[in-house]
């Protein structure tokens, strides 16, 4: 089973991908993570990417496609792939078709986690973590049991990510819409797109994804 998970930052793609990895032994293919790993490992594609990044340029579709192919070649033929952050353009969607076809794989589902922009702003902007142990909290949904004291380690310092602010979140949403707009119709025409309410409880989202994959 090979699927694409779509959704803006904060929609919960990472959480759901990790649950699929744990439940089905699938492999999450996140292009950002793969690029960093390939550069660190010094693979042929990694060396190419490193040279491009050192020049301050964007990594080309060809390099990203080669990276995806390299990862798939290293997986067992029955191991499913979760594509996270790729494809982002119509050209990349075409490249992914060719990559999968060359390896006797098919794309089974494109699952979009739909979100309400205003609610997503509240979800992201309210996040904070313990500066010591990293336990996550939220202004509205999960405060420490004792105000100002971490439930897990007892520390009294907390921090917020500098980009967890309304302007940044709305910019990310606009970028997501601009990038996914060209690729969703491609998959809609094939009848493989399913949409899930990404604002629902995490377990409900997981159950909805499982139903799509089972159907």
Image (tube, rainbow, N blue to C red):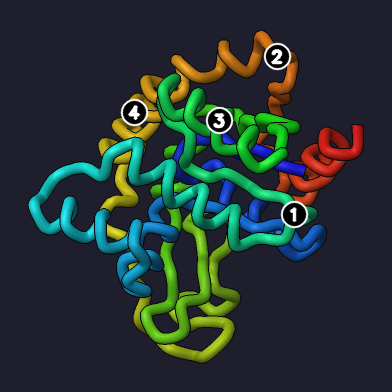
In the displayed structure, would residue 33 be above or below residue 112? below
Q: Name the element at disc 2.
A: helix
Query: CA gap, disc 3 to disc 2?
Result: 16 Å
Percent position (x, y) of residue 84?
53, 45
Q: Nearer the viewer, residue 147 or 134?
A: 134
Tell me what residue is drawn at x 35 percent, y 38 percent: 62
Image quarter in which the N terminus is found: top right
Q: Are marks 1 and 4 in contact (CB under 8 Å)?
A: no
**Residue position marked by numbered label 4 in the rendering:** 175
**Residue position marked by numbered label 1 in the rendering:** 77
Mark identifier at residue 17: none
- Which one is closest to the eye, mark 1 or mark 4? 1
- Which one is closest to the eye, mark 3 or mark 2? 3
Indicate left or right for 167 with 150 as reference.
left
Q: Which of 4 and 118 is in front in this view?
A: 4
- Which one is closest to the eye, mark 2 or mark 4? 2
Indicate left or right for 100 with 59 as reference.
right
In the displayed structure, would residue 40 be above or below residue 83? below
| Number of residues whose C-alpha sits closer than 10 Å to that of mark 4, classed few (under 14), some (14–19) or many (20 or more) | few
Tell me what residue is drawn at x 41 percent, y 23 percent: 91
**Residue position marked by numbered label 3 in the rendering:** 98
Q: Name the element at disc 3.
A: helix
| Number of residues whose C-alpha sits closer than 10 Å to that of mark 3, classed few (under 14), some (14–19) or many (20 or more) | some
Percent position (x, y) of residue 161?
32, 60
Q: Which of marks 1 and 3 is nearer the N terminus?
A: 1
Q: Which of marks 3 and 4 is nearer the N terminus?
A: 3
Query: CA gap, disc 2 to disc 1?
Result: 24 Å
């Amino acid at each position: 089973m090979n699927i694409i998970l779509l959704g803006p930052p904060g929609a919960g793609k990472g959480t759901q991908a990790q649950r699929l990895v744990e439940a089905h032994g699938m492999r999450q293919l996140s292009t950002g993570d793969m690029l960093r790993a390939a550069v660190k490992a010094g693979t042929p594609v990694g060396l190419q990417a490193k040279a491009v990044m050192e020049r301050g340029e964007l990594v080309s579709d060809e390099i990203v496609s080669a990276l995806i192919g390299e990862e798939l070649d290293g997986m067992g033929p029955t191991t499913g792939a979760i594509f996270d952050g790729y494809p982002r353009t119509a050209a990349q969607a075409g490249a992914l078709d060719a990559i999968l076809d060359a390896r006797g794989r098919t794309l089974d589902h494109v699952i979009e986690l739909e979100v309400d922009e205003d609610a997503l702003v509240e979800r992201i902007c309210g996040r904070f973590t313990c500066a010591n142990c990293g336990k996550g909290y939220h202004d509205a949904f999960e405060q420490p049991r004792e105000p100002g004291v971490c439930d897990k380690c007892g520390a009294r310092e907390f921090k917020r990510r500098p980009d967890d602010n309304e302007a940044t979140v709305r910019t990310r949403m606009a970028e997501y819409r601009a990038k996914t707009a060209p690729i969703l119709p491609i998959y809609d025409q094939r009848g493989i797109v399913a949409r899930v309410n990404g604002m629902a409880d995490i377990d409900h989202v997981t159950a909805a994804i499982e139903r799509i994959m089972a159907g």
